[in-house]
Amino acid sequence: MTFYVIDDHPLMREAMVMLLRRLRPGAEVVEVSHLGKFAAAVKAHGEPDLICLDLKLPDTLGVSGIREVRAGYPHTPLAVISSELAAHSEDPCIEAGADIYIEKSAGATEISAALKTLLTDESELDQEEVDGTQTKLSKRQKQLILMLDQGLSNRDIAEKLGISEHTVKVHLWRLFKRIGVNSRTQMLHYARVNGLLIN
């Protein structure tokens, strides 16, 4: 596996490299200081299995870096790790193509948990049986749908399940991707139409 850390701050890059090596000891972790150097790094080290991208780089503006990375690698897990508050930047980043938005202030344990969830196959993530519906939802995903129907926030869901808020976001991302929707509202409409809210 090859992971890329694109960040212009050497200390942050080093911290992310250490964290990713602990997460996947056999993986190659490549440091890139500017987005403009990413293509050359990929040529030298191979296709990415995960991209960790700083939002504010010297050669990007707003979410332009996310769009550029996503255009080249539409299916590679993309985590934006930024010093910007999620309240201001998370939605634009997700809309631009990021899979998850993580604040740098979250700390190593929380960042690690979110990235681990992002990297884990759904089959590994949900050891439970899947039901017989056409979409093959896991028990965890059906549980999330019921919680969304109750109007619970990500924080509420995290507390109920005993996981981090970032991990909840990754679970929801996987669920939306599985169903082919982009929002809670679309998810709940799909669930009602397909009888997924019947206990």
Image: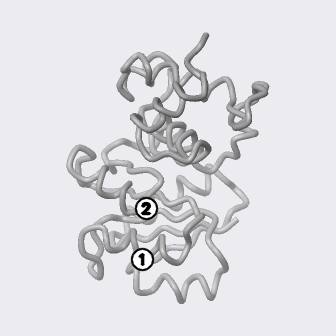
**Which of the numbered marks, if any, corresponds to residue 197?**
none
Q: Residue at x 68, y 63 (%)?
A: 27
The amino acid type, in three-letter code, at marker 2 is Gly
The quarter of the picture where the C terminus appears is top right
Q: How far across and down, in percent of the image, does residue 2 sit?
A: 65, 68
Q: Residue at x 52, y 62 (%)?
A: 17
- The first of marks 2 and 1 along the sequence is 1
Residue 187's place in the image compared with 195, above or below, is below
**Viewer-proximal residue, 33 or 15?**
33
Q: CA distance from mark 2 to mark 1?
A: 10 Å
Residue 162's place in the image compared with 69, above or below, is above
Q: Dot 2 surroundings within 10 Å: few (below 14), some, or many (20 or more)?
A: many
Quarter of the image for residue 84 reads bottom left
Q: Residue at x 56, y 47 (%)?
A: 180
Question: Is the residue under label 1 in contact with that under label 2 (CB below 8 Å)?
Answer: no
The answer to whether residue 149 is left or right of residue 126 is: left
Q: How far across and down, in percent of the image, does residue 85 sit?
A: 23, 48
* SS class, disc 2: loop
Q: Which residue is mark 1?
A: 68
Q: Residue at x 47, y 16 (%)?
A: 160
Q: Dot 1 surroundings within 10 Å: few (below 14), some, or many (20 or more)?
A: some
Q: Which residue is mark 2?
A: 97
